[in-house]
């Protein structure tokens, strides 16, 4: 059984849209495959209306421990070099390249910190 969130990830739609259009809280792999093979009109239109190639969901992974999650990207997220869990010491990530300074941005996903390497 798959959850509505799993279905939204696979269909690359927001969770709210999945609920609004009647994707059940639990569905089988076969039911989801049927939606993918013969998408309803609202899904076809949603995909056609998408003006950018920006994904609805992104995969986030900690460079230290490998923890990963999928989240909706936020407009304020920076372009990061590495992600680490908020309880890791950022020094555990690979060092920035020579000539680059590192800053930290908290609040990426549920518990990640972005390490942004930039030229000063």
Image (cartoon, rainbow, N blue to C red):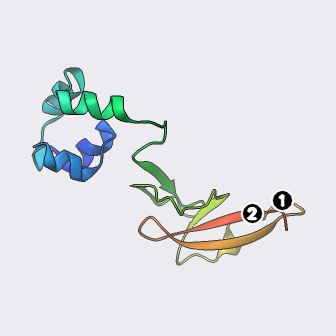
**SS for tag 2?**
strand
Q: Which residue sits at x=16%, y=25%? A: 34
The reply to whether dot 2 and dot 1 touch (C-beta < 8 Å) is yes
Determine which quarter of the picture holds residue 114.
Answer: bottom right
Q: Position of residue 24 (x, y in %)?
A: 10, 45
Q: Position of residue 105 (x, y in %)?
A: 60, 72
In the image, 86 versus 66, the foreground residue is 86
Callout 1: 10 Å neighbours few (<14), some, many (20+)? few
Q: Which residue sits at x=27%, y=44%? A: 8
Q: Which residue sits at x=31%, y=38%? A: 10
19 horizontally vs 57: left or right: left
Determine which quarter of the picture holds residue 46.
Answer: top left
**SS for tag 1?**
loop
Callout 2: 10 Å neighbours few (<14), some, many (20+)? some
Q: Which mark is residue 97?
A: 1
* One can see residue 101 in this view: yes
* Quarter of the C terminus within the rendering: bottom right
In the image, 16 versus 70, the foreground residue is 16
* One can see residue 3 in this view: no
Determine which quarter of the picture holds residue 81.
Answer: bottom right
> Residue pushed farthest top?
37
Residue that carries the numbered disc 2 in the rendered image:
117
* Quarter of the N terminus within the rendering: top left
> Residue pushed farthest right?
99
């Amino acid at each position: 059984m798959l959850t509505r969130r799993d279905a939204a990830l696979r269909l690359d739609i927001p969770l709210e849209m999945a609920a609004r259009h009647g994707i059940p809280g639990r569905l089988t792999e076969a039911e989801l495959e049927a939606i993918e093979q013969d998408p309803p009109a609202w899904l076809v239109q949603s995909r056609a209306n998408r003006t950018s190639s920006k994904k609805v969901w992104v995969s986030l992974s900690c460079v230290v421990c490998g923890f990963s999650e999928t989240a909706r990207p936020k407009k304020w997220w920076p372009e990061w070099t590495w992600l680490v869990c908020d309880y890791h010491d950022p020094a555990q990530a690979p060092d920035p390249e020579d000539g680059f300074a590192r800053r930290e941005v908290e609040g990426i996903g549920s518990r990640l910190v972005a390490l942004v390497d930039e030229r000063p």
